[in-house]
Image (spheres, helix red, strand yellow):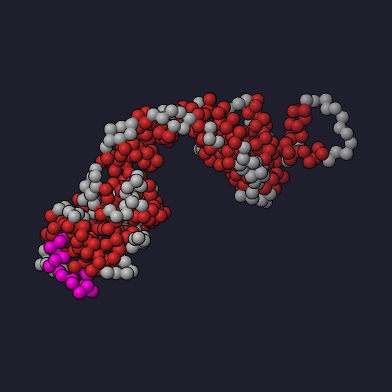
Amino acid sequence: MKKLMTLALLMACSTAMMAQKTKPTKPTKPATQVAAAVADTLDIKKLAAAASAGKADAQNLLGVCYYTGRKVKKDYTAALKWWSLAAKQNHSEAVANMALCYQYGNGIKQDSLMSVKLYKQSVKMGNVALVKNREKAFIKKPNVYDACLLADIYSYGVGSIKKDAAKSIAYYVKASDAGSLDATLGAARMYESAEKYPEAMKRWIMASPKSDFASYKCGEYLCKGLGTAVDKTKAAALLKKAANANIPNAQLLLGDLYYKGDGVDRNVAEAVKLYKAVALNGNPAAMWNLGVIYCNGTEVKADYNVGLTWIALAARKGMMNNVQDKLDATSDNGQNGWHGTPLYHYMNGINMLNGNNKDVDAALKCFTALEKRGNKHVAVAIAACYNDAAWKKANGKKKIKYLEEAAAEGDAAGLYGLALCCEKGTDVAVDKERALKLFKQSADCGYVPALCHLGNLYNEGKAVNRNLTTAIDYYQRAMCGGYLTREAAVVLADAYEKGLGGLQRNADMAKKVKAMVWTSDPVTYLCTSVIYR
C-alpha cells in the first residue's frame, strides 16, 4: 500500500532520471535509499507555490507529501484538500489518492462505498495502473477489500478495463470464502448470469442467514428447481423471511404459493395481502393477479369494479395485450379465457354505455340479461344507464332504485353512487348525514373514489370538521386501491413535500403519489380500449 501512496512522488522524480544521457554507474547505496535521497531534493516551497497556482500535478504531489509526512508535518486533512483540488481538474491519480483516504478513514470518515466509487472513477479516467498494482499487491497479500474492488471492476468493465466474468467470479469467490457477505452476493449474481445455477445456489445459501435478498433467491431457486431439486415447502419458509423484509419479488412468489396452496396451506386472503403490497410498488403481475381474483369471486367476494380496476392498472403498465388475449380466448379446453362469460358481457356493456359507438339501449339489454341470470354486479351499471340524461329512457327514480339495491348488497360502487345522490340531492332528497354514512361504508370496502371523496371533505371541512390528518389517512387508504384522483393526489403530494398533517417530509413519496393519478374511470378506460368479437 505504501508503494501506492508514494507512486506519484516517485513518478515526479523519473523525468530527471530519464534525462541522463550517459549510462549511470552502479549505485553505492540500495535503490530505495537512492530514491529517498532524490525525493529529499524536492523543494517543498516551490511545490506549494505551484500547487497554489493551480497546477494539478503539483497539487497531487503536495497531497502525497502531506499524507506521508515528507518535507512537511503529516496531515491527512491537508492531503485530502490538495487531492480534491487536483481531482477537480480531472487528475486521475489524485482521485485514486482521495479514495485511499475514504478507504482507511484518513482525514475523513471511513466510507468503503465512496472509496470504491472513486477508485473506479480513477480507472475510468485512464488510471489503468491502479488495477495492475492492486492485482500485484493482492497476489502478495490477499485481502477482502481488493478482491471485492477488482471483482466489481471486472464484473461491469470500467474505462479501458474490459468486462471479464471469469476474473470477477474468481475475485468474488476469494472474498466470499474469506467471509465477505457482499462478495458472496456478488459471486452468486455472477454465477447466475453465467447460468451456473448450482454454484449460484451454493452462494445464495451462504448469504441467506444475513441477507433477506439471498433468502428470496434461495426460495426462487427451490420453486423453479434451479441448481437444486424443487421443494416448495422449504421455498415458502425462505420466501416468508424475505417477504417480511418487503422484498417485492419474494412477496409476489409467496403470494402465488398461497393462492395455489403450493408448499403451504391455501390462503387466498394472505395471497391478496401480498399481491397488494407488490402492486403498490407498481408491479403489473401483482395488479393482474388481484384483478383476476376479484373478478372470479370464488375465494373473495366478487366485485367486477374492483377487479377490473386492478386489471386496468396492469393494462396501463403494459398488459393490455393480455386483456385482449383473455377476451378472445374461451373458458373451455384449458384456455381459461373470458370470451362468452358474464365478465365478457359486462365489459362489453360498459363499452356500449361509454365507448365511441355509444348505444345505451344495447348496454341496458346486455346488463338486464346478466341480471336475469342472477348476476348482482350489474345493478350499478343499470343505474348508470338510467342516469344518462341524453338517453330518451333516462329515469331518475329507476336509477335510485338500482343504486339502493346495490347498496343493500354492500356493493361499494352502489354505496358511493347513492351517497353522491344524497349529498347533492340528485333524484332524491338532500341528506348530508346519510351521504356521509354511505361514503364511509363504501370507503370501508376500500373503494378508491369514496376514500378520495372523504379525504377531500375532511381537507376542505365540508359536512365535517376540517382535519387534514384524517384527510391524509383516507388518501393513504385510497393508495392501497392502486390509484388516486387528481384532487386527492395534489393534496397528499403537497403534504409529503411540506411535512403537513403529521407526515414527515418525503420527496420520493410525493413523487410516487403524483404518479398514481388517474383522471378517468379505470374500468371505463379498460372496457373501451379493447375489441369485442
Residue 28 visible? The answer is: yes
Q: Which span of residues is magenta-colored? A: 387-403
Give the x, y percent position of residue 295. 27, 50
In this image, 333 relative to 127: left or right? left
Q: How many labels does the image show?
A: 0
397 inside magenta stretch: yes
As drawn, 28 above or below 121: above
320 or 476, which is in the foreground? Answer: 320
Compare residues 70 and 488 and report the one nearer the observer: 488
- 371 to the left or right of 250: left
Relative vertical location of residue 237 with respect to residue 464 in this rendering, above or below: above
Image-quadrant location for residue 366: bottom left
**Quadrant in which the C terminus is drawn:** bottom left
Q: Which residue lies furthest to the right in this view?
A: 22
Q: Residue at x 15, y 69 (%)?
A: 396
State whether residue 78 appears in this view: no
Left or right: 137 with respect to 222?
A: right
Q: Where is residue 464 in the image (x, y as percent from the top left)?
A: 16, 59
Quadrant in which residue 272 is drawn: top left
At 80% across and 40% down in the image, what residue appears?
16
- Which residue is at the far front? 333
Where does the N terminus fall, quadrant-wise?
Answer: top right
The magenta stretch spans residue 225: no
Q: Which residue is drawn at 72% across and 45% down?
A: 46
Using the image as rendered, state which of residue 414 and residue 49 is in the foreground: 414
Q: Is residue 185 above or below residue 358?
A: above
